[in-house]
Image: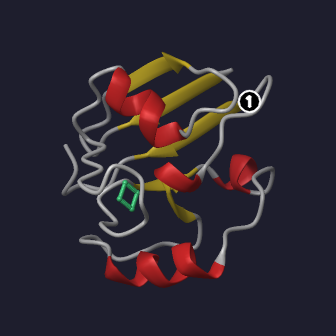
Amino acid sequence: AKITLTDSVGATTVLDANPGDSVMETAVRNGVTGIVAECGGSLSCATCHVIVDETDYATLLPMEEMEDEMLWGTAVDRLPTSRLSCQIRVTDGMDLHAALPETQV
Ligand code: FES
């Protein structure tokens, strides 16, 4: 699986991802500083916010209510395709594109 992250200045990072991991774990393991993930994935910090590409967003499992609620507390206002990357599971053959909010560079 593959994850492509673009930061707010337009720099792109392509990551190899293992099915079963979260997108946040994959990014942190690869040293992507834009994914802060203060809470380590326990859905309480909202510093793992990503804005998913529209086409890719439709392929993800719908988010749980808790994630939806947390997304109101992100540093940069949520967009229609915002997700918390600790709640996105990497699946087989995934090819996910997402942007990092400007506070997370
Ligand atoms: Fe804290 Fe995702 S890592 S909410």
Q: Between 100 and 22, which is closer to the camera in this rendering?
A: 22
Q: Is residue 86 above or below residue 63?
A: above
Q: Is residue 29 left or right of residue 54?
A: left
Q: Position of residue 62 (x, y in %)?
A: 75, 66
Name which residue lies at 24% across and 47% down.
36
**Quarter of the figure with the N terminus:** top right
Name which residue lies at 35% across and 70% down.
44
For label 1, the SS is loop
Q: How many marks?
A: 1
Q: Position of residue 92 (x, y in %)?
A: 80, 25
**Quarter of the figure with the C terminus:** top left
Q: Quadrant of residue 29?
A: top left
Q: Position of residue 10 (x, y in %)?
A: 32, 35
Q: Is residue 39 above or below residue 30?
A: below
Q: Quadrant of residue 42?
A: bottom left
Q: Is residue 84 left or right of residue 63?
A: left
Amino acid on which the number 1 mark rests in the picture: Met
Residue to which mark 1 is pinned: 94
Toward the top, the furthest residue is: 16
Q: Position of residue 60 (x, y in %)?
A: 75, 52
Q: Between 72 and 65, which is closer to the camera in this rendering?
A: 65
Tell me the colour scheme of the image: secondary structure
Question: Quick one: label 1, few (<14), some, or many (20+) residues within 10 Å?
Answer: some
Q: Between 15 and 37, which is closer to the camera in this rendering?
A: 37
Ligand 1 lies in quarter: bottom left
Q: Is residue 90 above or below residue 2?
A: below
